[in-house]
Amino acid sequence: MAAKHKPNPREGTYTLTVAGGEKVKAYIPPPLPPVPALELGPLFVLMEKANRALGRLDSIASILPDTDLFLYMYVRKEALLSSQIEGTQSSLSDLLLFESDETPGVPLDDVQEVSNYVAAMSHGLERLKKIPLSNRLIKEIHQILMAKGRGHTKTPGQFRRSQNWIGGTRPGNAAYVPPPANKVTECMSDLEKFIHEDISGLPLLIKAALVHVQFETIHPFLDGNGRVGRLLITFMLCAQEALQAPTLYLSLYFKRHRQQYYDLLQRVREKGDWEAWVEFFLTGVKETSDQAYQTATRLLKLMDSDRKKLENLGRPAASALRVFQYLQKQPLISVPIVAKELNISPPTVRKSIGHLEDEGILREISGKQRDKRYVHDAYLNILNEGTEPL
């Protein structure tokens, strides 16, 4: 007599549900932590490397002359990358033009989505100072993320009340069908408990890895799940003070390895193979932390070199340095905007921009006689790396 196949408790269950008029099997994940427990022994060395790289990245916050200025641009890069994964065609320059009330070169909805992401991230980080990472906060973040643009009709800030699916042209040929709507609240409640439990003794990076997949598997919203799921990683690290500032973003890593990313999520659902996912995630944390540290270091060197050029200008140096300081927050500028933001007269701004052009720091890009626009090429080029639309 053949031995009975023992069910794998990591695999979850399926239930029949109706979506788009079709009967389909929807997946319900088991609550975290995985049972049997993760085999972390083979991943210990990688986990140490990831933690070290994360610590080194976190230390950059204390040596940057103005962390807020670095984060201002870095957060926008992450917003852009995370939105590109969802199909937007926006660029960093488009976003900066949009934020300056100028016209970007792509559909407005694309840039609006990126701008919403920046607002959602900023809101979440601010709220974490007052309330714990919870379903309440996740809904608040989603509300802001979807408030304007394409997603505003997809019940922002509310868990879905209908069935969704991922991939395929209809539910019947979908790559994955998440839990039915009537199971979403229960699944998300279990996830919230896991975020705050400490009985499992799992290290923070491992917990963040598990939470991200579980959230993506539950897919609790009608739209915007991917972006919220990626934000959750950063919020967990900031909430537990593993990062002083939100300097770790995995969107570029996920973008570069997106097929492997999707395959590993599906492997967790179909086979309970959490270890393969955790290895991928820790590799991403290490690589991304190293890259972000190098980016910050290169920006520091560039700022230092540019500042020295301007300090030798003599009398005009003071106003030129003020314009230069503003450039680090907004590397795409025009005379009226800088004059208004810094409360300096337009002629003074014009002269300062002329000095910055002479020193090779700024370049005029509009080709117009009036309403000229200027870009800090070297600065934007460093930040632009990896942001080419898919």
Image: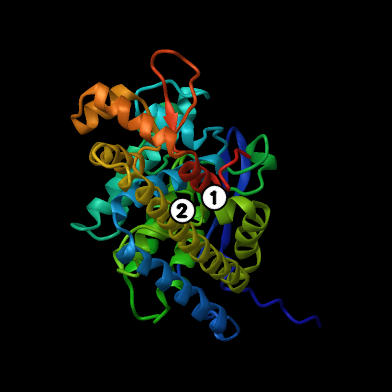
Q: Position of residue 117 (x, y in %)?
A: 39, 41
Q: Can residue 39 be seen here?
A: no
- State which tag comes first along the sequence, 1 or 2: 1
Q: Eyeballing the image, is 77 above or below 260?
A: above
Q: Position of residue 283 (x, y in %)?
A: 58, 69
Q: Residues within 10 Å of mark 1 (few under 14, many from 20)?
A: many
Where is mark 1, residue-wise?
A: 178
Q: Which mark is residue 33?
A: none
Q: Residues within 10 Å of mark 2 (few under 14, many from 20)?
A: many
Where is mark 2, residue-wise?
A: 230
Give the position of the N terminus as an image quadrant: bottom right
Q: Position of residue 232 (x, y in %)?
A: 40, 56
Q: Amino acid under label 1?
A: Pro
Is residue 139 toward the left or the right of residue 266 in the image? left
Q: Eyeballing the image, is 39 above or below 79?
A: below
Q: Is residue 269 or residue 355 the one in the foreground? A: 355
Q: Amino acid under label 2?
A: Arg
Give the position of the C terminus as an image quadrant: top right
Q: Which residue is pictured at 44% across the width and 52% down the height?
A: 302
Q: Residue furthest right?
A: 1
Q: Quadrant of residue 361?
A: top left
Element under label 2? helix
Is residue 376 toward the left or the right of residue 243 in the image? right
Q: Can residue 250 be seen here?
A: yes
The coloring applied to the image is rainbow
Element under label 1? loop
Q: Is residue 310 or residue 385 the one in the foreground? A: 310
Q: Which residue is pictured at 39% across the width and 45% down the height?
A: 73
